[in-house]
Every structure is written in C-alpha cells, then in structure tokens.
Image: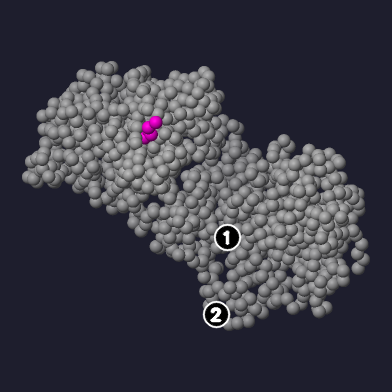
Amino acid sequence: MTINEVPKIITSRFDVVDGHTLAGYQRTGGYLGLRDALAKSPAQVHDDVKNASLLGRGGAGFPAGTKWGLAPANVWPRYMVINGDESEPGTYKDRLLLERDPHQLIEGILIACYAAACGQAFLYIRGEMAHAHERVASALNEAYAAGYVGKNILGTNFSVDIVMHWGAGAYIVGEETALIESLEGNRGMPRLKPPYFPAAIGLYQKPTIVNNVETLSNLPWILHNGVDKWNALGAEQSKGTRVFAVSGHVKNPGVYEVEFGVTTFRDIIFDPRFGGGIRDDRSLKAFIPGGGSAMWFYEEHLDLPLEKGTVDRAGSMLGSGAIVVMDDTTDIPKAALRIVRFFSRESCGKCTPCREGTTWLERILDRIVDGHGRPSDLDLLLDVCDNISPGLAWPPRQTTICPLGPSAVSPIVSTINRFRSEYEAKITMRSSIPVVGVSS
Amino acid sequence: MTDVQQSAPAVAITVNGTGFDANPGELVIEACERAGVYIPRFCYHPRMNPVGMCRMCLVNIDTGRGPALQPACMIKVSPNMAVNTEAPNVKKAQDGVLEFLLINHPLDCPVCDKGGECPLQDQTMAYGPGESRFIEEKRHFEKPIPISDLVYLDRERCILCDRCTRFAKEVAGDPLIHFMNRGNETQVNTFPDDPFASYFSGNTVQICPVGALTAKPYRFKARPWDLDEIGSTATVDSVGSRITVQSSRNVVLRYLGVDSDAVNWGWLSDKERFSFEALNSEGRLSEPLMRGDDLGKLQRDGAQLVRATWAQALRAAAEAISSAGPDKVGVIGGARLTNEAAYAWAKLVKGVIGTDNVDCQLGDGLPAELLFSLPRATIDEACAKGGVVVLLGPDPKEELGALYLRLRHAIVEDKVTLIELTPRSTGLSPFAAHRLAARPGQVDALARALVAAHDPTGDVAGVSSDAIGRARRSLQSATAVTVILGRPSLAESPDAVVDAAVELRHGVAGVRFLSALRRGNVHGALDMGLAPGLLPGRVPLSAGGGDLREEWPNVPAQRGLDARGILQAAAEGRITTLVLLGADPLSDFPDTDLAQRALERVEHLIAVDLFVNASGAHADIVLAAAGPTEVAGSFTNLEGRISPLAQKVTPPGTARADWIIATDLAGHLGKNLHLESIDQIWSEIIRLSPTHAGLDVTAAADGVLVRGGPFAYTPDATDATAAADDSLLLVATRMMYDQGVGLQNSPSSAHLASPTAVRLSPADFDKLGVADGATVRVATARGSVHAPAASDGGVPKGTAAMVFNQANASAAALIDASSRVTAVKVERA
C-alpha cells in the first residue's frame, strides 16, 4: 500500500477547535481564496474552475465548471442553490463540512456566485442536521457582520445574499429538482426533465445552478493555490482530493480525505490511517462503494482506484462517497432489506413503479427474512426489480422520473445471485405458513 | 393540446412503423391517438398540464439515439421520431405498471360505482397481467370519507394520478385537495376543517380514472351498463355547456360534461352537473292546479291551490286572458323555455293574445336592443391568447361557472389581460391586471375615461386617474378586446352599464361583447321575440313584421312594457292578468316591494312552471310544464350558439311541454297556432326569422352560431344624478347557490346556499364599530333587513355588498327599481 501524502484541502480544519468560527477560519488562511478570486474577472474564475476539472461531489460527478456554463446567457436573475440535503445511506461527509468548517463553504459559495453571476444563494440544509444548522447560521451572521456576505463584498461592487433553508426531512429532496420544489414551498417531488433542467428553468422558473456542499468547499483552496496544484492531484478526470465517509464493519469508521483517482478501496478500508481494516480482523464479505443507491462491490473490487470512470465501468458508482463495509457476519438478505426499506420509506409517491414497487420489494424481503418466503419469491423479486429498472443494467434504466426507484433495486440485484444460498436458506427456514399480514 | 398551429408544417413521425404527419408541438400520446394507436394512460388529461407520474404511457421513443422507454404524455413530437407502442419491453413496462397499480387497489369492482366504465378496469383487461402475484395485505383506509358536501373519497381505490388535485389547483383554482404523506402512504385528502368546497368539485368525479371519487347524487344509483344516454345542453345558466344526459328506467341519474372545444371543455359547474336532481324531486308539479274548491271552478279568493284537469285549467286561463283584453295582459319570463317553446309563446302572446307586454328578463338583465346592437364575441374569441377582457358584468364564478373556468384558463395560462370594472371583487379579481371598482351608478363615467384621449385629471367614479391611465394604455395597446357584459350589481339600474357599453363600443377599436345575461335560455327567448318591441329574429316591431304579418294572426301595433313596466302597470291596475312563464318576480325581481304590490293587485295570476315558487303560490292558475330532459328542442347560449336539447325521459304526471301549453291555450282562445311538432316549429323559425334563416343545429358538434346584426341602437337618455357621497351605496350580486327554486329542490345541493352578510370595506366596517358577524340593520326608503356585518377588502369604501336572494335577508327588498342607485343606511341592530 503506497498512498501519496497529500495536503488536506477541505478537511484541514477538522482538528482546529475553533475552525468553525470566523476567528479560527481567518487564522488558518480563511477568505484568502475569495480575495484571490475577486482580484480576477468572473470569467477568469470560471475558467479556473473549468480547467481544474472539479467533478460534482453530490453523486453524479458532473464537472462544476461546465455546469455553471449551462445557464442561458442574459436571463436574470440567476440563482445559486447549495444542496446540503445529504441523506444517502452511509454518507455523512457534508454534515461534517457544515459543522466543522462552515466558513469554507460560505467562501466557496461566494466564489461560485462571483464566477457564475448569481446575486442570491440558497443554502439548503437537511432537516435532521440541527448542529450543522446552528453552526452555519452563526457563521453566516459572522460573515455578514464582517462584510464577506451581503452588499459590496470586500469593498467591491460584488454583492451576494445567502439564504439558509432548513429542510423538512426527505431524502428525495437531495434530488435537485425536488430540492427546488421544496425551496419554493411545495411538496418535495422531482420535476420532469425536460423541461425543468435547473440550469435553464430552476428555482422560481429562473436559471439555477445547483451544487453540492463538498464541491463548493473546494473552491477556496483551488483559487488560492492555483489550478495547477489541484490538477497535479488525482487521476484521469478525477482531480484533487475527495472525502469519503467510511462506515460499517471497519476498525476506524470516519470521514477521510484522500487523493482522488489513485487511492484504492483497499487503501481506504484497510490502511491504518483510514478504515484500519475489518473489525476483529474478520474477512470482508461485501462493501457499498458509493452510498445506498450503488451496486455492491466485493473482494475482487478492492484494488480499483477511487476514480469515477473506473468505478462506473466496473458496474457501480462512487456516488456520494459513502463506503459501507460488511464483514463475514453480515446477513445479506437482512442488509439488503435494510436498504430497500430506506428507499421505500423515502419514495415521494409520485411515480407508480417506485411508490408501489419499492414497498412491494420491502414486503417480499421482509417475508423472506422473517422465514415466510416462498421459492418463487426470488424470481418475483427480480421481476419486480425489472419493472422498476428494465433490464437490471448499470447504469440503471428506469420506468420512473428520478433514480430513487432504481436505487432500491441495487442491493437486491447485487446480492441475489451471489448469495442465493443465503436467501434460499431463509426461504426454507420455516414451514410455509400462509401469509397475509405485515410483520414490520 | 389545443394550442397547435394548424398552418405550421407537419412533423413526420412513424408510429409502429407507419408514417404519420403530426402537428408541431403535439404530444406523442395525442399524435399516436390521432394516428389510430391508443396509448394507455391514467394521469394524462388533454385539458390539464401533463405530469407524467402514472407511467402507464411509457412507449419506446427513438429520436436518433436508439429506442428508449419514455412517457408519451410528456414528450413532444420531433421530426423523424419513431414511436413503438408494441415492443416487448413496452408491453412489459405497461404490464408492470398495471400490476403495481393493482397491488393495493381493493378490486371491489362489484360494489364500485365506476365498475363498467372504469379506465383501470378497462386497461387492466386490455394491457394488464391476468393475475396478481401480490399476496400481502393491501393498504387500508377508512372508506369512503366525504371531502365535501357533494363528493366522497375512497382512498383505497385511489391510484394517485393527480387528476383531481391538478384540476382543483390548476383548473378550478380551489387548491383544497392535496397529496399527503409520502411513498406508499401517500393519500389524497383535505386539510381538517377545510373541505373541498369548490363550485366545480363534480368534475373531479368525472375525471377520476377509478372509483375513488364518487358524487353523492349518483352513488349506488345505477350501473353504467344499465344507463342509456343522449347528448344535450345544460340549461341552468346561459353558458349552454354540452352534457350527456344519462338515465335508467325513465329517471335521469347523471349529467356528464362533454368536451366541447368551443364551450365548456368537458367541465361543468356543480350547479349544472347536479341540477337534474330538481327534476326528479317531489316538489315537481305533475298536474295543473287551480285556486278553488276542487270542483273544477276557479275561485280567485280560494284559500288554496287544488288539482285541476288540463281542460279546466286551460279554459280558466283562456278566460282570464280574454276577459282582460290584450292591453291588460302581461307576460313575464321565458328564459326557461327551449327556442321552439319561446317561439310558440311569442306567437301566442304577440300573434294571438295581441299584447306586446312580454319580457323574458326580470329587471336584472339588459335591453335586448342594446345586445343586438353590439358586435358579439364567442367564448373562444374572448379567451384568445394575448387579448384583453373587460369585465362589465356579474361575477362569472358565481353565475356562469363553466365560463369562469374558460376565462380563468385564458388569463392564467394564455396571458389574457383582465380589466375589471365591477363595483366589488369577483372570483376573477385575483387574476385581474387592472381592477377598477367603479362606484355604483358611475361606471359610464369610468368607461368614458377609459376611452378618452388623455388620462383624467382626477378620480373618476371613485377610481384614481393613475389606475385609469394604466388600464387605458393596456386597452389602447390591445389587439383584441372583449367586454363581458351583464349586470355587475342588481342594486343599480342598468342605465350606467348601458351607457358604459355604448362608450366602449364606440371608443375601443374592434371591440366585441360577450353577453353575461345569466338566465338559462334568455338569449334564445330574446331572439324569439319574448321582449317588448321585438319579433323573432331580432326584428324590431317598428320594422313592421314582414312575413310574420302573413303567417301570424296578428302583430302588436305598438311597443309594450318590459318587466318593470308590467309590474308597475299591474301594481297600478293597468294590467289585470299576469302570466309568469317560469318566472318568480318575488324572489328575482330587484324590487320586492313593487313585485309584491303587482301580484297582490292583479285579478288573475297564471303561472307556467315546474314548481310552485314564491310568486306561483299567489297564482290562481298553475300549469305544470315539462322540464329539461323531458322535452326536445334547441338552446341558444350567451354567444348565440344554438345546440340541441334532448328528451331523455317523460315529464311527471300530465305535465306538458311549454310549446304544447302555448298551442293548447291558443286553442282555448279560439285560434290555431299551426304548430304541431318541434321539427315543424324549427322549420317555421328558420323560414321566418332572418337571423335563423337556414340554420341546421345538427351541422356542427359544437352547435351553430346565430348570425345577424349588429343593429343600430341609441339608449334612452337617463338621469345620471349620483347619490349623496356620504351614504353607502348597495351592491347586490348573486351567488351560485341561492334560494332559487331549482336549487332548493335539489336535495344534495340545497343546503349549500349560505346566508348573506353585509360586507363593508375595512374602513367603513371600523367606522360602524361592531363586532365581526354582529347583526346590523340595513335600511332604505323601500324597507329594511337584518344581516350579519363583515369586513371585506374586496368591497370599496362607500359601498355595502350583499348577496341577492339568500334565505336570511333579501337585498331585493331594499331596492327601488326606478332609481339609478340604492343608497343604504347600515346601523347597529
């Protein structure tokens, strides 16, 4: 295991006790990137970000600089929306960024607004993150008072207002169009694309740029240290560093910043500086490489680098940067049920296949885990999955508007053939009792 | 969708391998349907914005990047698009969606009203899996729950297609039903204490693709396969919405809206939809009545109305008419009649009885000659994209429900600019670009200022010159202007509105008028000459009568009296026999005192009606008439559009069609009308009426427009003295649900009529110094009433607004029909 020593780009203040305050932030180099950005023209800043190949960190991995360029010219106002509704199972990196370094995000928002010509930014924070909410609120107050946010920032004619919005607790609002609906005060349900690509028709029907918390938190460093330094890190398209949340059966669960594109899953799971290996030195059974929606990986995938293209080609995704590790004690059908249940509970109810299908999957799995499965249930599970995500391919096709439905398919499709014996063992566990009720 | 430019070049697509020329901008689901390929759907409805959420319409769409499953209701056609609705993956997806929809559906089809006409049932048969693989317990909800006074919701049957909720929010503008909870727990419901109290709630029942929404008047009344149906026209207001009348065993059980592109787009107001209930009610007259002793002799001073034979009643009526002589006979009403019956009555009254004292309006309309003098607009013309609509009439939401939905759509979706000149806010006010609340009796001055070359120097009719200026510029820059013309308030005489209409007619280039006279077939009755000074075909009496002189026994020599004149004459003893042709002046004439004195003074009062209404209770002869669905004929709506009325059932008892009553009465008067059938009457109409010459009502699905005019018209000079400015001026408007006899005989709707309050501007209300809802006394020289007071931002300062014809207080009792405005005193009771 050879892991390059790299600078901590966005987690540098995680160990600074007062890193979340303005004083602590400024003492450790805060708001220098903003000053550097304001010394350039917005177009130059935009070019820097484009050249830096900063892939979106929310899950889809779309280059941020390109995204800013999609807003139609000369349609005003144009809004910036920051997606802090982090709720993908296993993901907790944005939460730490919000709690431990809120000023870094604010600085990133300001740089993005400057480059993309947005006068108003809406920072949407997941409803359950009360601590993050408090930290960001007090940081915003400090930043306003210090003249970093508001009118004529740092004496220039650049002005931005940042509005903080506290979500009401729905996973689907992490989908950008549903988040926009929620911001507008409506039910958090995805909009149809077309026509509602946020870049063209977004918040209040205006061009809107939606970026993830982690994505924007990188901007101060990039602007202050230069694009070349950034691009020197990482591999292929995946430049810079990236934060991964490692959880599950590892010795050291936590959030780790590693060089993007070259570090491997084996590194982050087993290196003592990161995951530190499987608990009790047991063996690895499976791991989820990119949050609950992702297809599962196994032993043979451990040496894949944490790089978007490579992981995509291997049949899953880095997604939200959540690595969930399962050791050999894991009950696979139960683990799959846990994730399917999450998606079924979080379905917004708009599209029939997701609303009805995910719940049906949950109930079949629930029966199987409970010992009331039938031999035909495994084929039924796969066929219901196929009706949500035709072909069961990767990347998933979908009969739904948004990818939530297919997300519930991943754990089943990932495991049902590889661990067929575990499923079958449960099916024959009890005598076949006619089932009508729900046990959950 | 309807916004397709027919002239633009076609878009060549293929549907299942066959070439088809689609319209530009057309949705795939529509293009395929026109190409003869039906794509199953639940959430898609052609009159609402697509949402793509049921996922039933997934088909393979290939725009060059290979076929992919896409919702056909969301994708617009593009050149060389290949649509495949039959591929195995499409069938699998449709099969899958139907299975998903059915896993929690209760499948209680045997006891479901929708069974037999249910899209879910039909599409399951056509596209669905044969059996269910779902063995778990289904989702359960309490069933059904009332979500309004008229509609029940069964959430177990609901498939969450968003049709009802979209209708409520987007079409009706009453967002009172919502999705609640999420995922598999999602349900449609209302908020507690906030029921789906919409005038248009019944439409949700009609568009529900399952049996989740059912209407109280139809629940468990019939199975669809036992229903027999026929296309007809709704008659409760003058919109003339196209409907399907459905009956079983000679009882009308349901009206459904028909998607007439030109008129109602499939929507109905609840008043239209459920009006059939009154026809089946026990209050219906099934035989003639006479005041007297039950021995077939009329006793004018008898205590009660008793049954009579038709021969007795008709003979007595003929005697009452002939003994009075033509000049002493007056006839009020006729808007209830079919065109054919209106012609028969016109021929009877003017041609046989020989009087011109006939008016189908009740002092709450406008002079027929004014209407005939104006260039008329259709609903489509008024609602055309980018136009300007001036509301100089009643609140369409309250009085002309289906028209309100069309206007609302035009304003909200099609960028039509609304300028309101009404004295108080209306249902359209939230969407009005310019709201100019003219002080009662002064709207003519406001109209004059709007068409002037410059902004006024000060306020006009209580409206600031700024506001007038903005509206004036909007009006001047408009490409198409339509004035919705009717009576904005019944507490002022029509004079100011008439003058305002004439100002706008001459001052706005290319302006057209859409009549908002509200009552049933009033436009047909006017066209048939049931108004003073007119003959059928919008021909003035003064023009001599032409062919009619040869065909009719007689044509009146001179112009007679209108409703107010007739009542005035009756009150003074100059008219002694009064015929109420489906009219109720005591409830509807905006001067109860005058109506009361008239009815008390006349020697003979003859009512021809479906019910004994408040005025009919004073009658000495009551002739039982057939109602809509019991007689065929035709109807003329507020555009002048004639559409067929169908007979579906027989009238109760011995009740007769109005045209037959006219011919019978003529016979008892010793004359023959030579009218023997509806077809024959119609052929006489199109032969003798210049505006109806050669019209074929069945020629077009949406009906045919009466053509003719405009005719010259000069309003009589009127007294324009305004009331003293320190008094409150009364504004009296109608609500959809009132004490009208039809509504009050509809069991499920009668209780929806709410009491009126006296609504004052917040400033005037504060000045009055009473608690909200406290009873106050409203008084004029005519009389006084008591009603609860309320503060209302939609009521301008200096006015007091009341609703006409509600149970607790009658605004009509305050109104003097001879004065231009009604000044009232509002004081603590």
Where B256 falls versus B728 (above or below)? below
- Chain ID of residue with mark 2: A
The residue closer to the viewer here, B827 or B729, is B827
- In the image, what residue occupies the spot 46% across and 29% down? B462
Residue B727 located within the stretch drawn in magenta: yes
Q: Which residue is mark 2?
A: A433
Amino acid of disc 1: Arg
Spatial distance from mark 1 to mark 2, Cα to Cα?
A: 31 Å
Where B687 falls versus B668 (above or below)? above
Can see residue B44? Answer: yes
- In the image, what residue occupies the spot 11% across and 36% down? B315
- Chain ID of residue with mark 1: B
Q: Which residue is mark 1?
A: B182
Residue B312 x %, y %: 11, 40
Q: Magenta segment, which residues?
A: B726-730
The residue closer to the viewer here, A360 or A109, is A109
Residue A238 x %, y %: 84, 55
Question: Circle 2 — which element?
Answer: loop
- Is A8 situated left or right of A175 in this image? right
Pick the quarter of the image with the N terminus of chain A. bottom right
Where A4 falls versus B596 (above or below)? below
Residue B135 located within the stretch drawn in magenta: no
Is mark 1 in CB contact (under 8 Å) with mark 2?
no
Where A281 falls versus B333 (above or below)? below
- Is B11 situated left or right of B423 in this image? right
Amino acid of disc 2: Ile
